[in-house]
Image (cartoon, rainbow, N blue to C red):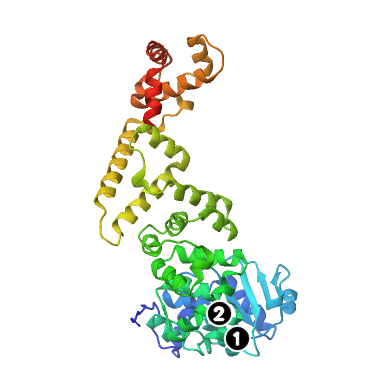
Amino acid sequence: MEEYRISLALPHRPDSPQLAAALAAAVPQPVRAIAATLLTSGYAVAVVGGCVRDGLLGTTPPDFDLATSAAPEAVLGLFPRAIPIGLRHGTVMIPSATGPVDVTRFRGRSLSEDLRRRDFTINAMALELGGEPVFVDPTGGHRDLAQGILRAPGDAGERLTDDPLRAIRAARFVAQLGVEPDSALREALPAHASAAANLAGERIRLELERLLVGPYVERGLLLLREIGVEHLLVPGVRPDAARITGAVPPQLTLRLAAWLRETQAGARLRKLRFPSRTATAVERRVAAHPARDWPTGGPGLRKLRRRLGDEGLAAVLALGHAEITAAADGLDGAAADRLERVEAALAELRRTGALDVERATLAAGGEDVMRWLGCRPGPAVGRALRWLTERVAEDPTQNDPERLRALLADYLADGASSLDARKAEE
């Protein structure tokens, strides 16, 4: 296995008092206050899990978790604002000025036993509070993190059986941190793919969201494929999906579109409980792909922009570039040329203001057209408005009522032939 090493922000020895002191200094005061209340009530308490790992890496944890010897009922009694969010697992959430703090009873009889039952060694580290802080690392998580190794505490199969979602979480940590599974974990992962893929969509979605915006997303997606989870979640993902996804910026809807292009993306994302807005945005971007097949004319590009919006338009262009430059056989010259012409056409439309021209921006409406044409409401009015919109898109200075009336006279003189020709071009 290729060796990856991670530069720790706190490179002290695990048994160094300086390491524990540095980690303790990063714990926010509201979290310390919760810990102090538990300590003065006679309970053991420690900061645990991902926030300790993030502290070693020098990044700000999104939240803080505490493990304690106190039963959840005791925690609820000590903190009137506490909310029981997982009594079955012994977890109580306490609102604080630094955000929600989850307080969970030890899984087992002690902190050390609790840590040995966690998902991976890099998450099985703790900072024990009370007196001088003590860094607790019974499974070698500090060493594994420094060496870029993802390892399960104890038997990998047992840890994955405890919660099959850990199979997907392993790929998430690969994508987030650049760690690599050790041989035991890699061998155990495939046997839990089916159970992981059949878990509640909400749980899977949270892991995928973090995986897809990770700096090592390609490696994370390749692991999902290797262990058999990807096919179970989204059948028909393209062979080059991981490479293309890694070649686009870390924006969730864009990376979802890159990963799921040419699949039933919207349906799959809704099944995984992604927000409807996200599923729809990805669906539209996948449908508009590839950008190199787009028209280069103004009418078609404006129509596409109306459907995708500016963000979606930029996303599909980025996806097109990624697909071209990451092609296995090198740069696709014809596709690159087409994409260049599309972007040049869009730039010119933006320069002239023509990209923003729509029927609603015309200086004349349906009633004006009916008066000028001397007709009643009907298809002819719509055709005339479309024709005027295209003329203004070609020359925005024409967007004046009198000029539009003059243009409409030309339209009548042509017998609507110009409009029919324009429709054929679109």
x, y percent for residue 252:
47, 57
Residue that appears at 40% across and 13% down: 415
x, y percent for residue 225:
45, 70
Residue that appears at 65% across and 90% down: 109
The answer to whether one can see residue 24 in this image is no
Tell me: 203 left or right of 386.
Answer: right
Quickly name the residue at label 1: 114
**Nearest the eye: 406 or 235:** 235
Q: How many marks?
A: 2
Tell me: 244 left or right of 225.
Answer: left
Disc 1 secondary structure class: helix
Distance from disc 1 to disc 2, alpha carbons, whole Å, reads: 10 Å
Identify the residue at the far top of this view.
374
- Above or below for 232 versus 356: below
**Nearest the eye: 177 or 217:** 217
Determine whether label 1 and label 2 are within 8 Å by CB: yes
Residue that appears at 49% across and 52% down: 282
In the picture, the quarter occupied by the N terminus is bottom left
Quickly name the residue at label 2: 48
Of callouts 1 and 2, which one flags the residue occurring earlier in the amino acid sequence? 2
- Above or below for 10 versus 314: below
x, y percent for residue 10:
40, 80
Rate crowding at label 2 as few (under 14), some (14 to 19) or many (20 or more) other CA atoms within 10 Å. Answer: many
Residue type at the position of mark 2: Val
